[in-house]
Image (tube, rainbow, N blue to C red):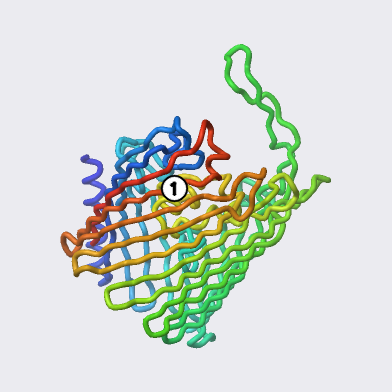
Amino acid sequence: MKKIISTVAAFGLALGMASAASALDLTVTGKYVLEGYYMNQADGAVGFTPAVDSDDAGSMSAWVHTFLFKPTLKVNDKIKMVSDIRFLKDTEMGDKTNQGGTSMGIGDREVDIHKIYMEWMSPLGKTRLGRTPGGAWAGDFLSSSSNADRLMWWPSFVKAPFQLLVFTQKSVENDWYTSNNDSDSDLYKADLTYKADNMLMKAAYNYINDKTHSDDAGTAAVWSIDQATGLNALTAAVPGDSYDHQVHKIELYADMTFDNIYVEFEGAYVTGDARDYDSNTDDIDVEAYGAMLDVGMKMGDLDVGAMYFYASGDDDTADDDLESLMSVTGGTGDDFNPYYILTGDHSGMLNSDEYAQNATMSSAGVHCIGLHSDYKVSDQLSLHGALAYAEADEEPNNIDSEYGWEVDLGAKYKLLDNLTYEVRAAYMDTGDFFDDNATAGESDDLYMLSHHLTMTF
């Protein structure tokens, strides 16, 4: 505890001295979230994932909490530093293991400097340098907020209502002083935006050049049981099969309003070489599609709409073509949560936020259509409801395509200006897709209950 207090005190003193000396403008926002979850018949082997539920699967429950701390340091009217520091991000209470961040001497609790970057305004435009927001692009579909090491530029010669963004992203650095191999992974992107009254349209082109496996020769391993210890041990190394990964991705987005009607669309097309082998091994090509359309109407305090989304599936995972979009993108997007079970952060069916999305569903793809409604009862209370039906795009191994029906109900109440409480309930009538994949017997229907206390500042 003394170490924590000393660290905070030193940090505050340094900021105070800097502010006094340079008249720096420091603002801090953030939130603390405490959530409780219960799901019946969840597959305990993979957390909250109701992927192949059976009569033998047990229920799951946990308390989960997150603390986000987001300081912004404005040096002057041209330069600012932005950061996103995460403590205990979606950490289960009772789990004191490090979840991928840096412990910084505070037991084994996670501390993750998730983003830290500089923005600089000049006559040439806006520049953003550092560990920036990454992954998330426009709408929530196929969007997974993350971080990325980028050099970004919005040139000033492109005038409103248009805006151009170009950047390079270093995903993996492998030819620095520890290695002289050309085995980096890089992303290059150009994003053109048109923004006018009641209309936002975007188009982007991505080129991913991943050469991290281009020098795999000699890295493949042979494992076997050591007779003396009874443990699985590395016994030999054999030549690997080197390949390049070079993929092109086109993204489209539109958000428009017409009086009280709104329309949102997002689409993606991915093509290229998933694995371009150096040897005679058959190359694996990728060609996958996805789209989302949400149309709704706002009538005073009532918002009603209909949504359809699609991600292509692969009917043969053993051939030389990769056609499953979710296998490439990691699901429908961690930020895309229209339904509590199908796309929930802690259910892991179609996204991979806290638990990996179901691999069988990713390969099969998805068609989903649903209705949603939100009603603001008062300044303190709002209600939510949704109904959805989902099925697979493809039917690998001739299994049934029906994922099933889901019904969601939710209520959010503002306890104080900075404190809200939300309760959610969801039920899913599982289809024959899960029966055909059940580990024992028929799959059970699912229900999930959760409540969420959120403090913002």
Q: Can you tell which quarter of the image residue 383 is in?
A: bottom left
**What percent of the width, then of the height, locates residue 321?**
72, 53
Q: Is residue 169 left or right of residue 113?
A: right
Outermost residue toward the right in this view: 280
Residue 193 visible in the picture: yes
Residue ID at (26%, 61%)? 15
Residue 172 visible in the picture: no
Q: Could you say which is closer to the camera, residue 117 or residue 388?
A: 388
**What percent of the width, then of the height, locates residue 200?**
47, 79
Residue ID at (70%, 48%)? 316
Outermost residue toward the left in this view: 416
**What percent of the width, then of the height, locates residue 68?**
31, 55
Q: Quadrant of the N terminus?
A: top left
Image vertical order of residue 398 relative to residue 146, above or below: above
Residue ID at (27%, 70%)? 25
Outermost residue toward the top in this view: 228
Q: Could you say which is closer to the camera, residue 69 or residue 327?
A: 327
Q: Can you tell which quarter of the image residue 96 is in?
A: top left
Residue hosting label 1? 429
